[in-house]
Amino acid sequence: MGATIINAVREFIKRFVDTMPIGPNQVQVGVAMFSTTPKSEINLNSFSSKESLSSALSRIKPKPSVEVNIGAALDFVRTNMLRPESGSRIQDQVTQLVLLLTSKKSKDSVQQPAEALRQRGVLTLAAGSKDADEAELKQIAFDEAMVFILRDFRLLLRISREMISHLSTLTGVVVTEGPTETALAVGKRDIIFLIDSSMGATIINAVREFIKRFVDTMPIGPDQVQVGVAMFSTTPKSEINLNSFSSKESLSSALSRIKPKPSVEVNIGAALDFVRTNMLRPESGSRIQDQVTQLVLLLTSKKSKDSVQQPAEALRRMGVLTLAAGSKAADEAELKQIAFDKAVVFILRDFRLLLRNPREIISHLSTLTGVVVTEGQTETALAVGKRDIIFLIDSSMGSTIINAVREFIKRFVDTMPIGPDQVQVGVAMFSTTPKSEINLNSFSSKESLSSALSRIKPKPSVEVNIGAALDFVRTNMLRPESGSRIQDQVTQLVLLLTSKKSKDSVQQPAEALRRMGVLTLAAGSKAADEAELKQIAFDEAVVFILRDFRLLLRNPNEMISHLSTLTGVVVTGPN
């Protein structure tokens, strides 16, 4: 790629390394270079400190070549670098990621080498510029969402956020048509497949095979991943409880006994209620009380005869992450009501296609974690990783809006496991000047935190300085003495809520937060400036535009889902 581009790529990796906890028990980084032949520059176990790793990165040099063999390079990584002697912890079920960066189309074939990596559970991302071939990169990446096309790799230093966010937060295993060689790092989870039994023998066989292949890749057991199955037409029935089988073999054998049941109609609402009241219970094997992630995947080919709204809502209130897949006469709008997020609604022409392209659904089942919250309070605070969350509120919004924001935060707090070893919440208010209302370490119980939230008051102002407010959070609130656990590598989130465009500049303050690895979300209403909010947020997907912040109380799902599940660090521009 030439010296200028290699320098930019090297700087990108250095900045990533600067934000990571490097070490043999934490994050390990390796580097391989290739043109027509590949070569290992840095093995995963070569360096155990940031300083030595950065120094080694400085010695990486370009090697001119007209052609490149990406297939050979992928095979080299798999056979030489993803091995215990080279530092790979693949046998210890540690997530394995490969980021390919290329400016050319490969001379050799990439299909088999990419497939071989997928079969080992490796999560491959692919970035291309200039003469790179997008279709080829899609063959290489474990998911098309992990393909990045840049005009020039020097832009990595400007727009690195999305890529580094994925490197920091992706976890688990990706599955292809064949079973993987080994089941890789997947967190504890209870997964129920809720299957429309009216779909006919051919489709049920395909669904059954899809589940079997998923099971083959998972670490099945009472302390790992548990799988249950329920079938429904007009009435639901449990086929396999979460605690019925503790081995892949017995579970696969039970799956073989699942049969279709012809029916003209289906009652999905009743089926969702059945799962909630009968299968997501300790006696049926659910570990919901132990804060283990609960997932339900609905697969149906029909619109429901009964209503799904209340049953879906009841599952969300329990914190269950419901995914919905439909084919044929399934109703997409109905599936969106059922799923905890629109991004986990899957429409297929035919469920037999599950066997050709299972990656997206299986990726979600393998990696999703946490809890989703709706208008009402959850019945219990569920699995949410340690996190420090600061709500940064525009105090000029008036008492009605401030009351709504305060109520939104209270409802969020009610669903979280609050405490110094769990979730901590802080609040800052700002107009032209910022002020800390609640530090992260001010309160260690929901009751005291909710009481303090009640004392938050508006402060009328024509103008707001969001830049100053962001700087204040960074320099005053994200510090150990204010309760921040940033030095302990606990995820740091800031949610900005404003109804105005800033008088001062937000660019440098937002950039400074990103350099610290802080995940900033931005919500605006009325006269807030969307372009400005996009500058502030660590990713455009976490910018929320509302007509009125009172709507937060009607539809808080998406925002609260991000606050509950986002983890890791995001990095941008120069240090």
Image (tube, helix red, strand yellow):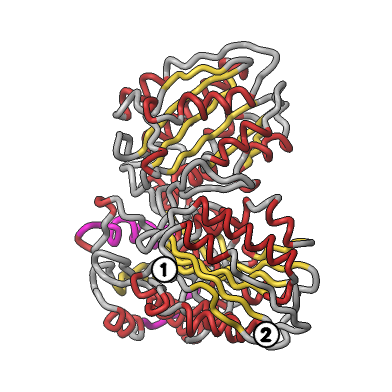
Separation (CA) of disc 1 from disc 2: 54 Å
Q: Residue at x 39, y 39 (%)?
A: 289
Q: How would you rate the neighbour count of disc 2 (Cα within 10 Å): few for under 14, some for 14-19, many for 20 or more? A: many
4 or 52, nearer to the observer: 52
283 or 566, nearer to the observer: 283
- The question of residue 470 being in magenta is answered with no
195 or 278, nearer to the observer: 278
- Provide the secondary structure element on which disc 1 rests: loop
Q: Residue at x 29, y 29 (%)?
A: 247
Q: State whether residue 392 appears in this view.
A: yes
- The question of residue 79 being in magenta is answered with yes
The magenta segment is 60-84
x and y percent of residue 70 in the render?
45, 62
Circles 1, 2 touching at the beta carbon (< 8 Å): no
The answer to which of marks 1 and 2 sits earlier in the sequence is 1
Q: Of the residues shown, which amino acid type is indicated by label 1?
A: Thr
202 or 547, nearer to the observer: 547
What label does residue 465 carry, if any?
2
x and y percent of residue 3 in the render?
47, 86
Q: Is residue 526 above or below residue 349?
A: below
Q: Is residue 568 left or right of residue 313?
A: left
Q: Is residue 414 left or right of residue 459?
A: left
What label does residue 13 carry, if any?
none
x and y percent of residue 2 in the render?
49, 82
List the residue tagged with mark 1.
36
Q: Is residue 450 above or below residue 396?
A: above
x and y percent of residue 10 in the render?
43, 80
Q: Is residue 369 left or right of residue 182?
A: right
**Which residue is outermost to the top?**
262
